[in-house]
Amino acid sequence: MGLVIWSAKSGRVDNLWEYTMGEQTTITTFYEKDHDRLDELFKTFQRLKRSDFPKAKDAFKEFKVGLQRHIVWEEELLFPMWEEKTGMIEDGPTPVMRFEHSQIKQLLDTIHQKVEKQNPETDQEEQALLNLLNAHNRKEERALYPAIDNVTSAEERAMIFSNMNTIPEDRYNTCCGQD
Ligand SMILES: [Fe+2]
Ligand SMILES: [Fe+2]
């Protein structure tokens, strides 16, 4: 039921969210789809920042909030599930992924500070962020997500999807003018 409430609340997430209703939905397919959605938003920001800054800024905000939400989902639900199921905590892949998240968030903040000042000169930081994100997402999509799908049951995955829904929005919904 929680899924329906969320759906009604936030238009753009609908498609993504309906995805979790299918019986075959895996962590890999859902999270890959969210990576793709975020990639598109970032591309829109890059494409428009020198021609239509307000639109570019909107895309950036949606990207930033979406990426922050994605990271909260991973760090608070997905990774703990993996750590619990495998006992791999210090010696597994999740500490590396968490470290990369902190690097990603630093770059995101650097770009954000310039976007707030209507400054489009962020090419270098954008490239650095893309390099980090692409490598990070590839590791998750090829290794960690499939591994999580392997160690969880359909019920456990459904529980993750449903718990993703209960994380308060103020945990990740911070961007221009709000933080
Ligand atoms: Fe991640
Ligand atoms: Fe991810």
Image (cartoon, grey):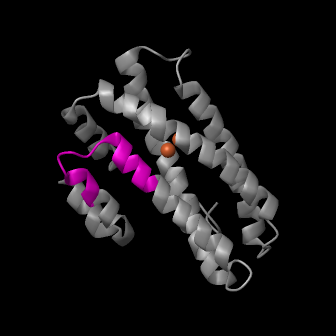
Residue farthest to the bottom?
51
Q: Residue at the location (35% across, 47% down)? A: 29
- Location of residue 90 (image quadrant): top right
Which of 128 and 176 lies nearest the eye of the viewer? 128
Magenta segment: does it hold 65?
no
Which of 126 and 69 lies nearest the eye of the viewer? 126
Q: Is residue 120 left or right of residue 88?
A: right
Point out residue 91 in the picture as x, y percentages from the top left corner: 55, 14
- Location of residue 78 (image quadrant): top left
Q: Residue at the location (48% across, 58% down)? A: 36
Q: Quadrant of the N terminus?
A: bottom left
Magenta residues span: 18-34
Q: Is residue 174 left or right of residue 161?
A: right
Point out residue 100 in the picture as x, y percentages from the top left corner: 64, 37
Q: Residue at the location (60% across, 81% down)? A: 55
Point out residue 136 in the picture as x, y percentages from the top left corner: 59, 41
Image height of 2 relative to 44, above or below:
above
